[in-house]
Amino acid sequence: MNFRNRLSFHHQLNTTPNLEEMDKFLWREINLARNIQTTLLNGEKPKLISGELTGSSIPARLIGGDYYDFYPLNNGKLRIVIGDVMGKGIPAAMLMILTRGAFRSATEHTAGPGETLTAMNNALYKDLRSLRSFVTVFCADWDPSTCILTYANAGHNLPLLVRGNKIEELPKVSGIMLGGLPNQVYQEAKLQLKTDDYIYFYTDGIIEAQNSEGEQFKRERLINVLLQHQRKSVNEIEKMVIDAVDSYTDGTPLKDDITMVILKVGEQTTDISSFNSPYDSSIKEKEE
């Protein structure tokens, strides 16, 4: 629809609405927004020489408010983020795009996950408060040379560490959701990982998915799925979780988006240096 036709269309809306034409126009706009969001979420993933990495997001509606991203840094680390915007549909998707922009901008000028969340909250706070919304975000830096995961949390679900036949949440680190309070400083924690460890990042749409009786999938079922398939690849585990939720809900519409990121630790150094990043390598990393 060119500019002249758009003017004509909006004139019709302001006079005698053509509901069929309006419906077609809105569907075109929604599908365009969905394509943009899908492209952003399914962007280029870093190529790992050793270890595995995957991420996926299934919106509860045509457009979702969940977010995940990978950002390789010039210092050899990989920054991972996963987030969940309050709300659903187009409003949540718009805030998700703002969150992505804030993350990308903050990552270029911050040395670690804690500073990244602090910068994101400073950038988004006024907008989120004016819209009466918030975003939960978990941010982590993966260092393949030392197998150390450094992370900070803004009110999000703590990822699960899958190690052999045991699963546990990452040690807690406090931090309020983005948009909750101004001038927040987000603390960091560190975790030493081992070969074949998995880190499972997720949003609460997975554990809160409901069946026809209104019963939730819950974290216990998620843990059972991860334990049953922990020797498989990250792509296989991702599929098994999605299949388990799909089987449990059995056609019941999702009430919230489902998003996950899975990182498996390999035996050798993960090479992510070939992935171009504008990160300022002159920023010195803080000492632990």
Image (spheres, rainbow, N blue to C red):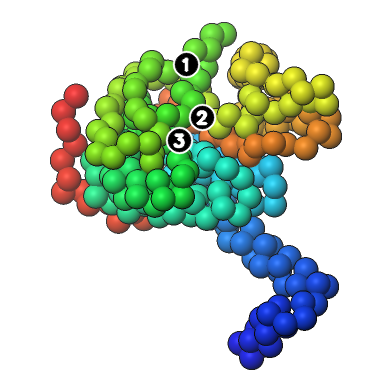
Residue 136 point in image, percent of width and height: 45, 35
Can you tell which of label 2 and label 3 is closer to the viewer?
A: 3
Q: Which mark is residue 136?
A: 3
Tag 2: amino acid: Phe
Q: Earlier in the sequence, mark 1 or mark 2?
A: 1
Q: Which mark is residue 59?
A: none
Q: Secondary structure at mark 3?
A: strand
Q: Quadrant of the C terminus?
A: top left
Tell me if mark 3 has few (under 14), some (14-19) or many (20+) residues whose alpha carbon lies within 10 angstroms of its own.
many
Q: Where is 131 relative to 288, above or below? A: below
Q: Which residue is mark 2?
A: 201
Snapshot quadrant of residue 225:
top right
State how far apart marks 3 and 1 are (Cα). 17 Å
State how far apart marks 1 and 2 are (Cα). 10 Å
Q: Where is 126 relative to 215, above or below? A: below
Residue 100 point in image, percent of width and height: 44, 51
Which residue corresponds to the image point at 16% horizontal and 49% vertical from the top-left? 282
Tag 3: amino acid: Thr
State how far apart marks 2 and 3 are (Cα). 13 Å
Q: Which mark is residue 169?
A: 1
**Residue nearer the viewer, 234 or 187:** 187
Q: Earlier in the sequence, mark 3 or mark 1?
A: 3
**Residue nearer the viewer, 226 or 247:** 247
- Specify whether residue 142 is in view: no
- Specify whether residue 159 is in view: yes
Tag 1: amino acid: Glu
Snapshot quadrant of residue 111:
top left
**Residue nearer the viewer, 53 or 191:** 191
Residue 267 point in image, percent of width and height: 43, 25
